[in-house]
Amino acid sequence: MRFALALSVSLITGTASANSMAIPPAQHGIFDSGKLPPSAQGIMTFGEAGSISLKAVPYSALPLSAPIGTAFFCTDCAGQGQPVFFNGTIWVDASGAGVKHS
């Protein structure tokens, strides 16, 4: 019983300490209340009802390199536009096929 109580107190204290620590903007991530680093601002928007919107850009504005899994909505890919993802080498669609400007 004492062990369980000591463990509970330790976890609560540790969590409170961690939540009060200042985190540099470059170390923020997607699971910390949307506080993304400045370099990631605008890639994805979270709506109030839990919806997610990708930043819409033309093919010519897709970066030449990005972190694997980065997603945009390419406005002029596949005729009417489609979500695209960076696989570490090229931009691909959801099926994994390389995307092209149309």
Image: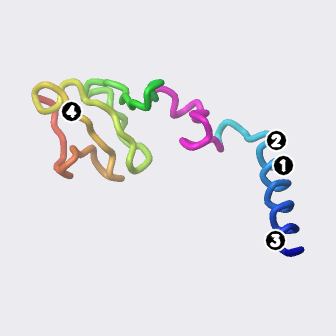
Q: CA distance from mark 1 to mark 4?
A: 43 Å
Q: Closer to us: mark 3 or mark 4?
A: 3
Q: Are marks 2 and 1 in contact (CB under 8 Å)?
A: yes
Is 37 magenta? The answer is: yes
* Magenta region, main secondary structure: loop
Between discs 3 and 2, the one toward the N terminus: 3
Residue 46 vs 13, above or below: the answer is: above
Q: Residues within 10 Å of mark 2 (few under 14, many from 20)?
A: few
Q: Is residue 49 left or right of residue 61?
A: right
Q: CA distance from mark 3 to mark 4?
A: 52 Å
Q: Residues within 10 Å of mark 3 (few under 14, many from 20)?
A: few
Between discs 3 and 4, the one toward the N terminus: 3
Between discs 1 and 4, the one toward the N terminus: 1
What residue sits right under mark 4 in the picture? 82
Q: Nearer the viewer, residue 80 or 46?
A: 46
Tag of residue 17: 1
Q: Closer to us: mark 3 or mark 2?
A: 3
Which of the 4 image quadrants contains residue 49? top left
What residue sits right under mark 3 in the picture? 4
Q: Position of residue 41 (x, y in %)?
A: 52, 28
Q: CA distance from mark 2 to mark 4?
A: 41 Å
Tag of residue 20: 2
Q: On the rendered image, what quadrant is the N terminus found in? A: bottom right
Q: Are marks 2 and 4 in contact (CB under 8 Å)?
A: no
Q: Closer to us: mark 1 or mark 4?
A: 1
Judged from the image, the secondary structure of the residue bearing numbered disc 2 is loop
Q: Which residues are magenta?
A: 27-43
Q: Is residue 28 left or right of residue 86?
A: right
Q: Nearer the viewer, residue 8 or 92?
A: 8
**Residue type, label 4:** Gln
